Amino acid sequence: MKAGNFKQITSVVVARHGKVLYEQYFDGEGAQGLRNTRSVTKTVGGMLVGVAIERKLLTVDAPVMPFFKDKMPVAHPDPRKDRITVEDLLTMSSIVECDDFNEFSRGHEERMYLIEDWSRFYLDLPVRGFPEWTPPPDKQPYGRAFSYCTAGTALLAPLLERATGRSVQDFADEVLFKPLGIEPVKWQVQPSGAAMTGGSLSLRSRDLWKLGQLYLNGGKRAGRQVLPQAWVERSIKPHAQVREGVDYGYLWWLQPFTVGDRKVATYAMSGMGGNKVYVLPEWDTVVVITTTNFRVPGPHPLTEKLLTTLILPALPPE
């Protein structure tokens, strides 16, 4: 990494059985550096939704539109948009036309950043079409059509604020960050003032490890149930298929890797540039890799190569 073979890796933390085995920083920020891990933030938003559901402030099948009556009427009205649920946002599979992987998509996140009201941007999107070469939801695994949509996850912040009556920052501090001993944190905010649950929350690498470890421990930290165990289990089950061999939970990426002659199951928080928090349940291991490879071609395969060729083979055998 110091030789630049993996471009701009900024930190690596490897922990097994709840203890850090390896920790190294490859930039000038060191252990106290706040890492802008981009869409890793999305998974944090999903954790907050889980707590709101446990407190009966939300339900996973709650329609989204009634929370935004002040945004009515929306453009491109359609009864199917009225049926968009919280789960649709968590699984990147709502009916609106929003695809960050397609630069021509009306819902592409770069178009959202140009306007003031990001909530209305999402709510105004038209219903997506399914031409012959794109299977509709009922023809896809798990009955959902995945479409990577940052605008939908950005909507989770104002949704949470309306459901809880509090800012996302305050809610996150109370139910997640303080119980885990995570500080400081740096949120990006939307023009409306709501936290940006779609990306760019900055945390220290060890604090990213704590989030992965929380899921590895079934939502517990030092004997305290921080997240509901049922929510943790539900979040890391497949709910949509991204592509062959890669599934999607509730804002978690589910992907197996091959290491030697072993297939290793992982679920991961993932952000632009190849930023990753990998959880390996069968290995009782969490791997944090942060980068600034935002303009490097193929950053995600580069991080995956680091994981599978250097980190996992070096772990002591059980």
Image (cartoon, grey):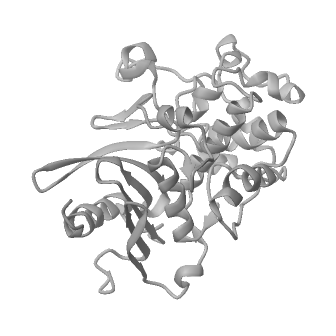
In the rendered image, which quarter is residue 138 located in?
top left
x and y percent of residue 248 in the render?
43, 36
> Is residue 76 rendered to the left or right of residue 70?
left
In the rendered image, which quarter is residue 95 located in?
top right
x and y percent of residue 25 in the render?
45, 82
Residue extending farthest front: 223
Quarter placement of the N terminus:
bottom left
Residue extending farthest right: 70
Q: Residue at left 29%, top 63%? A: 307
Q: Residue at left 76%, top 53%? A: 174
In the rendered image, which quarter is residue 309 located in?
bottom left
x and y percent of residue 290 in the render?
46, 68
Residue extending farthest left: 261
Residue 69 in the image: above or below residue 33: above
Q: Residue at left 49%, top 47%? A: 215
Q: Who is closer to the viewer here, 16 or 272?
A: 16
Residue 117 in the image: above or below residue 208: above
Q: Who is closer to the viewer here, 135 or 17?
A: 17
> Is residue 211 rendered to the left or right of residue 3?
right
Q: Who is closer to the viewer here, 241 or 58?
A: 58
x and y percent of residue 296 in the render?
40, 68
Quarter placement of the C terminus:
bottom left
Q: Residue at left 66%, top 16%? A: 83
Task: Tell me how many marks there are.
Answer: 0
Residue 254 in the image: above or below residue 95: below
> Is residue 82 rendered to the left or right of residue 138?
right
